Amino acid sequence: MAVLKTAGLNLEATQLESIAAIQRLSVLALSVAVRILQLIQARDNPDLPATVAFDHNQQQCLFTIAPNVEGKTQLQQNPYPPQTLAWATWIIARIGGWSGYRSQKPPGITTLIRGLEQFESAFFGWQLALGLLVCTP
């Protein structure tokens, strides 16, 4: 699976030696890989709901981010209906560095992983700012 290999999560480069640690890492990596594959699937199924990969709070955060990643021209606007997985994938890809032009090839695994990492950081900060996440020592 390309998502787990060098172009994606680079799982084979782990320096973990314990079988238990490698198993835990693999489970974590597989959960991310499934999410990336869901985002890729959205390219061919634009009617899938965003709830396939994002909960309600994550979708609200995506709504907040969306205006900041859309360009000024019609060609750089998110062409997908809100709350669809294709809409969310477009935003994640833009965060990951994709230009957003339909004339370019669709965003790849590396771009989606980078975008998902950036989104998770932004989502954490968004939750803190709204008081939705309480960090305790």
Image (cartoon, grey):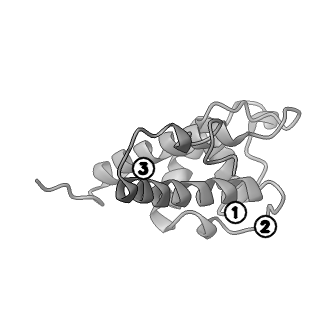
Q: Amino acid at mark 1?
A: Thr
Disc 3 and disc 1 in contact, CB within 8 angstroms: no
Q: Amino acid at mark 2?
A: Asp
Question: Which circle's residue, 3 or 1, is located before the other in the chain?
Answer: 1
Q: Position of residue 97 (x, y in %)?
A: 63, 30
- The residue where tag 3 is placed is 123
Q: Which mark is residue 84?
A: 1
Question: Separation of disc 2 and disc 1 at Cα?
Answer: 6 Å
Q: Position of residue 3 (x, y in %)?
A: 65, 47
Name the side, left or right, on which 3 lies relative to 133. right
Closer to the camera, 20 or 88? 20
Question: Which circle's residue, 2 or 3, is located before the other in the chain?
Answer: 2
In the image, residue 9 above or below residue 84 = above
Name the side, left or right, on which 34 lies relative to 87. left
Question: Which circle's residue, 2 or 1, is located before the other in the chain?
Answer: 2
Q: Amino acid at mark 3?
A: Phe
- The residue where tag 2 is placed is 47
Q: Position of residue 132 (x, y in %)?
A: 30, 60
Q: Residue at x 19, y 54 (%)?
A: 135
Closer to the camera, 85 or 62? 85
In the image, residue 114 above or below residue 2 = above
Identify the residue at the far left of this view: 137
| Location of residue 76 by image quarter | top right
SS state under label 1: loop
Q: Sort mark 2 into few (<14), some (14-19) or many (20+) by Cα contacts within 10 Å.
A: some
Question: Separation of disc 2 and disc 3 at Cα?
Answer: 24 Å
Q: Sort mark 1 into few (<14), some (14-19) or many (20+) by Cα contacts within 10 Å.
A: many
Q: Residue at x 45, y 63 (%)?
A: 57
Disc 2 and disc 1 in contact, CB within 8 angstroms: yes
Closer to the camera, 80 or 110? 110
